């Protein structure tokens, strides 16, 4: 009984893969952009290698301490390849452009 079920599932999976392979899948272009300001290039080079600008722009306005903690978390917990000497400049950009007024 189990063998028949496994064979039926394998056949179904193979058929589904063959049918899906007939179409070409394309992801939409990422059209999100950071606010143009000093430091945007640094954020693009160091943050957008892992996530889009939408991830930044859709955050609620945060103060310096919260943005700093977010950047530190990205470095320490998620392994973002961000040199420590660039973290402050990124936080500065984020606070000025996406921080609390």
Image (spheres, helix red, strand yellow):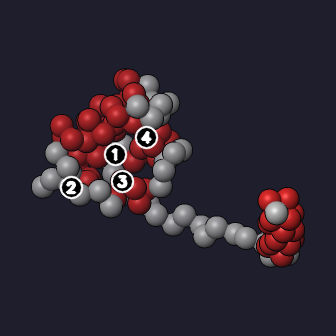
Marks 3/1: CA–CA distance: 16 Å
Dots 1 and 4: beta carbons under 8 Å? no
Mark 2 vs mark 1, foreground winner is 2
**Could you tell whether 24 is left or right of 37 in the image?**
right
Quadrant location, the N terminus: bottom right
- Whichever of callouts 3 and 1 sits on the residue coming sooner in the sequence is 1
Mark 2 vs mark 4, foreground winner is 2
Within 10 Å of the Cα at label 3, are there few (<14), some (14-19), or many (20+) other Cα atoms?
Answer: some
Any part of residue 67 in sight: yes
Numbered circles on residues, count: 4
The picture places residue 93, in percent across and down from the top left corner, at: 30, 44
Q: Quadrant of residue 64?
A: top left
Dots 2 and 1: beta carbons under 8 Å? no
- Can you tell which mark lies on residue 42? 4
| Picture residue at 26% right of the left edge, 53% below the top | 97
Q: Secondary structure at mark 4?
A: helix
Marks 2/4: CA–CA distance: 20 Å
Location of mark 1 (residue) = 38
Marks 4/3: CA–CA distance: 14 Å
Q: Secondary structure at mark 2?
A: loop
Q: Secondary structure at mark 3?
A: helix
Within 10 Å of the Cα at label 1, are there few (<14), some (14-19), or many (20+) other Cα atoms?
Answer: some
Location of mark 3 (residue) = 56
The picture places residue 44, in percent across and down from the top left corner, at: 47, 47
| Picture residue at 33% right of the left edge, 61% below the top | 58
- Can you tell which mark lies on residue 61? 2
């Amino acid at each position: 009984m189990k063998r028949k079920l496994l064979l039926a599932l394998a056949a179904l999976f193979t058929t589904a893969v063959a049918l899906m392979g007939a179409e070409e899948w394309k992801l939409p272009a990422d059209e999100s952009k950071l606010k143009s300001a000093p430091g945007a290039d640094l954020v693009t080079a160091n943050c957008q290698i892992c996530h889009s600008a939408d991830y930044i722009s859709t955050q609620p306005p945060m103060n310096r301490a919260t943005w700093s903690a977010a950047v530190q978390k990205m470095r320490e917990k998620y392994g973002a390849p961000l040199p420590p000497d660039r973290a402050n400049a990124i936080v500065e950009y984020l606070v000025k452009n996406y921080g609390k007024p």
